[in-house]
Each structure stands twice: as structure tokens, then as C-alpha cells.
Image: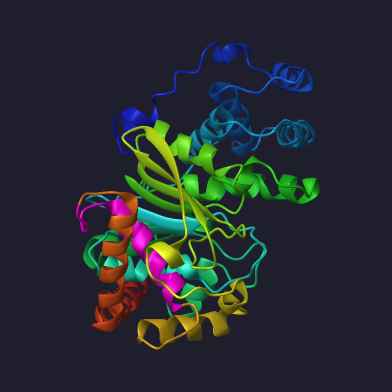
Amino acid sequence: MSYHSDAAFALRKVPHMSQITWKSILTKLVGGDHLDAGESRWFVDSLMNGDANSVAVGAVLALQQQLGLTADEISGASQAMLAHAVPLHVGGEITDIVGTGGDGAATVNLSSMGSVVAAAAGVKIVKHGNRAASSKCGAADVLEALGLPLDLTAQAVAEVGDEVGITFAFAKTFHPSMRFVGPVRSALGIPCVFNVLGPLTNPARPQHVAIGCADRTLSPLMAQVYADHGQNGMVYTSGEGLDELAPTGPVSVWEIVDGTVSEIDFDPAEKLGLERIDVSALKGGEPAFNAAVFRKFLAGEPVASRSTALLNAASAIVADGHHVPAGDLIGRFNAAYALAEQTVDSGAAQALFDRWIKTAQAKQRNQ
């Protein structure tokens, strides 16, 4: 079953939809029971329609957090959010590489840097992202600082993806119904299911994913949601709780292949022959600072975050699967890392990035 198809997205048959009410949901959660996917989809749909009671929503989100989220609850919420999203139609097989954020490390924009390299290596990328929430510079912030216009229409975003092989889906553009969610989350002031929905709700519905998750307790749940939706790829968390792959120590990877999730732990420094670095070497700052690091990385300069950005590019290349030979995960990562390194050092990544910015700016002028 392909998640990319509309039929697949409608795969969850919600039982007894007419019987679901805020009272029934709250009664279930107060009793210590988790919501099923249909109930989770119902309350998020109500919220995004703008007709939900904010007190009831806050209670549901808080109770879910207290009980601990389940894959069904995350899946149902992501379905509702995608149902309200502006569609994004990019041709061919596409891949997203993004992190959940919230790791507190305030690193440079590693998945954004890696996305350009993966695209230049032949992986079609539709990167989904937003402005910073818990750091000083999110994906949208750094790309804007580098010259990428964020106000493109959905059609223009799709055209850029088809013409260049990479495009950016700005969450604010594609998820207008999130305006009903923000005030509730702000008033609640604690993590909730919406903290993990960003990576799961790319409006282009990619077939392949390389997703960093800061909370390793949620990583296998996210991987299971992707598996249930027919997507392939991986979710990963570093030993330090980064939502990135990094040669700072051991990492945990939940690989998703044809509906099955398997976990593997390995140390990139040992298995890939990379120099071990400290998390502090990845520290970022304001958009101008992160953009400068981004430019130096693409130019092939030995920035401190180079191996980590290349490792994240490798994760997208492995997730796509078309540019590395079959074999065990470590072998595929070795091949993908070598390809990523060659792509930067040859100037191909810089050339593709320049073309991306130029094409997007031309689309903006013609809107």
C-alpha cells in the first residue's frame, strides 16, 4: 500500500464516528485508556475546523501527555492535520529529511545542509519545515537568510521541486489551520502530540523519510506511524538526545522497510571511520551565523559540522535507496557518506543550491 495515494491516506476507517464526543474522549483518557486512531483524528479535526472548545482540547492534550502517546494517537492526529493541509504535488519519488527539534542543542541547520547534498546526489527532496520554535534558527530562517523566498504559492513550490530536484514546503503556507492550534499550545505550555507532527505531515506525502527525533521514547512510535502509512526510511536519535545523526557517540536508528520497523544501534565514528566530535562543535546561532556556516560547508571548507551534515545527507541517500548498493545498514551508510562527500567536494552541491535559489526567486517574481 502506498501512502502517497489518496486511497491509502483514507485507509483508516473510523468506527462509530457519530458516537465520538469531547465527553467520550475525556472520559476515556481520565479512565486511563488511550485514544484509538479514529478518536485522535476526530479531536484534531475538530480543533483545526476552529470549532473546538479550547478547555477541552487542553485537557485532552495534557491527559495524553500524562499517559504517554501511542502510535495510534500520533497516526490519527497526523491524518487530521494532513487532511487540512494545502496539497503539494511534486512528481516522482520524493524524500524528506527533517528533525523534530526540541533537543535543546541549538545546532547549525544540519538537516537543511544535508538536504542540499542529498538532492545534488540525485535524491528528490521536498523538505518540510518552519521557523525556529525552541532555537534561534529554524530551517525556514536559515533558508530565507540564504535567499530562498518563503512566500511562494503551492504551485510554485511544486514547480521548483520538479525543475531543480529540491524544494521547501514552508509549514506556515501549507498548514493554515494550525492558527487554531497555536494559542492552545501556548496556553498549555507543555509538550504534546503536536510536537512530533511536523515531520509526519509533509504535504507532499513523501515515500521516503530520514527523520531525527530528540526524544528516543517517541522515535519507535514515529517509525511505526511511517510504517503503517506505507513510507520507507528511518527515524534516528543520537545518544546525546540530538534530533540528528552525529559522530558524537552511539546513535539509534529505527529503519522502516515495507511496513516493518527494526532498530539498530551503532557508533558512526567507529563504523564509518569518522573523527569523533563534541556536541559543542555543532553549536549554531542567529540565521546570519548559520547561513555563513551553510555557505562554507557547500564551498567544501572544513567547518566543524561538516562530517555531521554529510552524515545527515547520507541518511537521506540511504532512505531513498536508489543510489547505494543493497546490503546491511552500515554498508549502505558507508557508501552514502562517500557519495555525499564527493558531491560537496566536486562542487555539485554548491551548483545545485545556487540553481535552487535562482529558480525560486524567478518563481517569486512571476507570481
- Kindly indicate the quadrant of the structure image that contains residue 128: bottom left
- Kindly indicate the quadrant of the structure image that contains residue 273: bottom left
Please tell me which residue lies in front, 170 or 282: 282
Q: Which residues are magenta?
A: 306-325
Asked if one can make out residue 359 in the rendered structure from this viewpoint, the answer is: yes
- Kindly indicate the quadrant of the structure image that contains residue 310: bottom left
Classify the position of the N terminus by image quarter: top left
Point 58% across, 71% down: residue = 107
Magenta stretch mostly in which secondary structure? helix
Q: Is residue 140 left or right of residue 148?
A: right
Point 56% across, 75% down: residue = 282
Please tell me which residue lies in front, 15 or 266: 266
How many numbered marks appear?
Answer: 0
Where is residue 59 shown, x and y percent of the image?
78, 32
- Residue 132 sits above or below residue 362 on the image: above
Where is residue 122 shown, x and y percent of the image?
22, 64
- Residue 90 sits above or below residue 13 on the image: below
Where is residue 61 shown, x and y percent of the image?
72, 36
Point 28% across, 52% down: residue = 320
